[in-house]
Amino acid sequence: MRRLSAVHVRVALAGSLLVAGCGTSPAPTPAPVARALLITNARIIDGTGSSARAGSVRVRGERIVDVGELQQLQTDSVIDAGGLTLAPGFIDTHSHHDRGLDTDRSALAVVSQGLTTVVVGQDGGSHIPLAGFFAALEAHPVAINVASYVGHGSVRDSVLGANYKRPATAAEVERMRALVAQEMGAGALGLSSGLEYDPGIYSDPSEVLALAKVAADSGGRYISHMRSEDRELFKAVDELINIGRVDHMPVQISHAKLAMRSLWGRAPELIAKLDSARASGVDVTMDVYPYQFWQSTLTVLYPARDFDNRQTTDFVLREVAAPEGLLISRFEPNPEYAGKTVAQIAQMRNSDPATTLEWLILTSEAARKSGGKGGQGVIATSMDERDIAKLIAWPFANISTDGELDGRHPRGFGSFPRVLGRYVREQHVVSLEEAIRKMTSLAAHNMGIADRGTIAPGMYADLTLFDPATVIDRATPADPHALSVGIDRVWVNGTMVYAKGATTGGFPGHVIRRARRS
Ligand SMILES: [Zn+2]
């Protein structure tokens, strides 16, 4: 039973005085009493890495105002957490959940994972101009907070257009630098690149360095889907580290992975390389998602774009992914192949896997070039779980999804609960508190986002209430939109957006712009 506090009495008296309006001298005007949300009976993991502790959190408006052993006030609306764990809302530092967000404003894929902030504009692809994207989000707010990088590929596309399969000229680099400066002015967190994709793959490292410098000069950062995640992984890491060293900016590897059989087991070598760069003064970090399979286009399997080179194809099938591990997620020239592996399609076509893989790519490329529908996608099993665990455990690695609202890869719905269930509870890769730090304050730090990522007075009230004993992903490649379990309730900027398996219809999300330098 709740005790009537002194505050309650004061509020009641002030109210009656106002109504009565009695007395000869005017009664002192009471300060308006805003109602607050009090979440009681929680195990609080504050995001800093500190141990869980029992307590309550009070939220007024969009901010956390108090944390600890709190007395209930008469103005509090109380939610009893029932002993569940309350963490800062999770932050996804590599997201494609902006696709379709204008119609799916509740962002079920996002909030059902306990995520409250997504960072988009990844892999070199962003909205341009960002000012328009941000304005649209503010005119029609969504359930979640959104921040964005400016994409190198999008900038390159704006300047080089269709004639992009070559290094840019000095004049073009200057025009791209101006565009990056404009987008940094709009609030981009920094520059992203996708150097395994068109058109970024055709850029010279000096071009990327020159554009990243513009972001660095604005206090921004660099994040990269690197030139290679398999054959030339370590060389690609060198390019990223060099940008951090020369441009004096924080640099982050997107969705770090060792995506080739002969790289399996070499996560310690990668981490040693990054640790040594950090020791020499380079602020290098990474994000990682918890799956052994990636999703992309078939073309990334061929960095030289030599789609009919049988030697390359044999290498791909031997080293990068077996025919049984290449699941076609989309194939517009023949949609019935979606959901089947290259091994299965080869059988259907009475062919062998190598011929079939080449046929799939060449057919989609031909359709695309003739202006038809050539869209394709693949989910490829290329990683070893022991490497994933080592990457997750690296103290400077935060968690990401690389997911979409309506994607075929289960990461769009399952990544964060999967880390909490599989890698924390089942495999003890890191402690729960450390995992939460990676999902919150470290992610905010790695993105340069202030005022979010910890539970403390003054911070925005992005909060996730979950059950560490049951939390787990349910999404699979066969059922990629299955909801995770164990995420109980989620608040964004003090407003509940998700409760017990359903979105609430609240749209409290903010656009997060890079904090300007004073
Ligand atoms: Zn990527």
Image (cartoon, grey):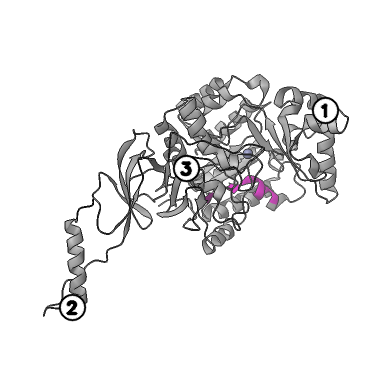
Residue labelled 2 has its Cβ within 8 Å of some atom of ligand 1: no
Quarter containing ligand 1? Answer: top right
Q: Is residue 34 above or below residue 58?
A: below
Q: CA distance from mark 3 to mark 2?
A: 49 Å
Q: Is residue 47 visible?
A: yes
Which disc is residue 21 wearing? 2
Q: Is residue 284 visible?
A: no
Picture coordinates of residue 57, whole percent (x, y): 32, 47
The amino acid beneath tag 3 is Ile
444 drawn magenta: no
Q: Which structural element holds mark 1?
A: helix
The amino acid beneath tag 2 is Gly
Q: Quadrant of residue 353?
A: top right
Image check: 389 left or right of 195? left
Q: Are marks 3 and 2 in contact (CB under 8 Å)?
A: no
Residue ID at (20%, 66%)? 12
Q: Which residue is mark 3?
A: 487
Picture coordinates of residue 310, whole percent (x, y): 84, 26
> Which of disc 2 and disc 3 is earlier in sequence?
2
Q: CA distance from mark 1 to mark 3?
A: 43 Å
Q: Which segment is the magenta one?
A: 146-157
Q: Quadrant of residue 37?
A: bottom left
Picture coordinates of residue 154, whole percent (x, y): 66, 49
Q: Nearer the viewer, residue 132 or 33?
A: 33
Q: Is residue 385 above or below residue 89?
A: above
Residue ID at (21%, 70%)? 15
Q: Nearer the viewer, residue 45 or 236?
A: 45
Q: Residue furthest right?
A: 350
Q: Which residue is mark 1?
A: 354
Specify few, some or many for label 3: CA neighbours under 10 Å numbering under 14, 14-19, or 20 or more. many
